[in-house]
Each structure stands twice: as C-alpha cells, then as structure tokens.
Image (cartoon, rainbow, N blue to C red):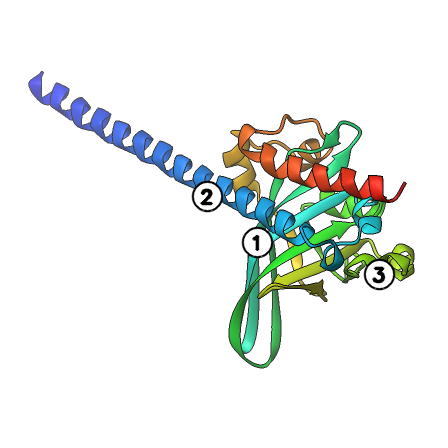
C-alpha cells in the first residue's frame, strides 16, 4: 500500500512540475509577445513623429492593413538570410482589428559580408492587399505586387503607387526611413504566437476582420495605428 501511494505521489509531483513549467513557459512567451507589440508601437510612433520623413498621409489614409516588423535581422556571408517577427492589424467597419502575429523570412545570394537590424513596415493599399494579408503565407513580388513606398509630404503628388501597388514596403535603419524592395521575402502568419496571445487557435481571418476583441496588451499598438490613420484622413479631406 505504501509502495503504491509512493508511486502515485511521484507521478503527481511530476505532473505538477510539468504543468508549472508549461504555465511558466507560456507566461514567458506572452511577455515576449507583449514586448513585440510595444516595439511595434514605438516604431510607428517614431516614424510618424517626423511628417516630412514618414509615410505620406495620402497613403496611410488609404491603408487597409499595416504590418510592423521591429528589428528585422539580415546577415550575410556569401549566402544571405533574413528573418523577423512582427504584428499585423487591418481596418474594419468597427475600427482597426486586434493584431495577429507574423514572420517575414527570405534569402539572398551574393558576395555579401555584414549584418544589420532594420525596422520594417508593410502597408496594404487596397482590397487585394487586404486579401494578401488574410492569407496564411505569401511571397512579396510573386504572390502579391509589392513596391518600395514613397516617403514624406512631397510624395503625395505621385500616383504610380495608386495604380500598381497592393503593398508598399518601408524600412528604417540607423534613423533613415525609406522605401525598400522586399521582393522574394515571405510573409507568413505565426499560429503558435497567436495561440499564446488569444488562448486558442482562432483563425487569422476572424481576428483581422474585427471579430475578435483586442487583448488589453495589444490595445496601445492598435490605438497608435488608429490615431495616425485618423490624422491622415483629416489631412486629406
């Protein structure tokens, strides 16, 4: 009897330790996601703080979705690689949606040596761009028409981006904000991170179409995007 009780006591302790480890791991993961949301919010705020060198209001006022990838990593030694993680929110009839978590990855070949970290923003410009963002995975330049976005107030007079672009891409490195060519990189949705934030595997489309409440941790990011969108709309009335 004592042996039986001891056996089950050991099993119970093992289960308790396993559950505690899982909870601690989930808490750590969620803390990282909150930090990513905070970083994304900071990227948007800092870029839009200088109107003459930011995303033109004529573009932001037409945006259907915004993807922000803070500290996109690029390193190369003969064969280059790129990888970053970020968040996406889309405009709905109820306002800007709760975010989903995404990853951007790609490769490049060439005699390159060096490395850098860059903040990236991808702006979906129309319904096709919105449909691109709702996909689980797509390649920029192949599955979705993407081009380097114009910057600053003077760019508002340009019309090429209105005619062709589904997605406009931007980068910020060492304080310099400019359009960037991201053709060949793949944007995919991170199911694991989204599950950690929302507690279960909610379909990305459900979230980005505004059918999921925004978690408290994500509200500052979503409100920041909404604030600059409203400002851009006011400027373009």
Q: What residue is at 53 percent from the left and 33 percent from the top?
A: 217
At a point 72% along the width and 42% down the height, the residue shown is 228
Residue that mark 3 sits on: 154
Residue 16 vs residue 100: left or right? Answer: left
Mark 3 and mark 1 residues within 8 Å of each other at the beta carbon: no
Which one is closest to the eye, mark 2 or mark 3? 3
Note whether 42 is above or below 153 in the view shown. Answer: above
CA gap between label 2 and label 1 equals: 13 Å
Mark 1 or mark 3, which is nearer the start of the sequence? 1
Q: Residue furthest toward the top?
A: 1
Mark number displayed over residue 32: 2
Residue at label 1? 70
Corner quadrant of residue 233: top right
Q: Nearer the viewer, residue 12 or 107?
A: 107
Does label 2 or label 3 sit earlier along the sequence? 2
**Left or right of 152 on screen, residue 39:** left
């Amino acid at each position: 009897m004592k042996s039986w009780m001891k056996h089950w006591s050991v099993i119970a302790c093992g289960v308790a330790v396993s559950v505690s480890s899982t909870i601690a791991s989930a808490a750590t993961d969620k803390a990282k996601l909150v930090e990513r949301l905070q970083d994304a919010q900071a990227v948007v705020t800092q870029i839009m703080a200088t109107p003459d060198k930011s995303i033109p209001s004529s573009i932001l006022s037409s945006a259907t979705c915004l993807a922000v990838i803070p500290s996109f990593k690029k390193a190369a030694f003969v064969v280059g690689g790129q990888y970053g993680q970020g968040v996406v929110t889309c405009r709905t009839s109820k306002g800007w949606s709760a975010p989903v978590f995404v990853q951007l990855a790609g490769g490049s070949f060439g005699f390159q040596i060096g490395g850098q970290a860059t903040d990236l923003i991808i702006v979906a410009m129309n319904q096709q761009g919105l449909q691109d963002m709702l996909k689980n995975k797509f390649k920029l330049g192949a599955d979705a028409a993407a081009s380097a976005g114009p910057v600053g107030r003077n760019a508002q007079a340009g019309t090429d981006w209105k005619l062709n672009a589904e997605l406009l891409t931007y980068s910020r490195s060492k304080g310099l904000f400019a359009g960037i060519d991201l053709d060949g990189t793949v944007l995919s949705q991170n199911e694991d991170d989204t599950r950690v934030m929302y507690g279960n595997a909610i379909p990305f489309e459900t979230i980005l179409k505004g059918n999921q409440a925004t978690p408290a941790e994500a509200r500052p990011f979503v409100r920041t995007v909404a604030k600059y969108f409203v400002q851009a709309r006011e400027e373009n009335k």
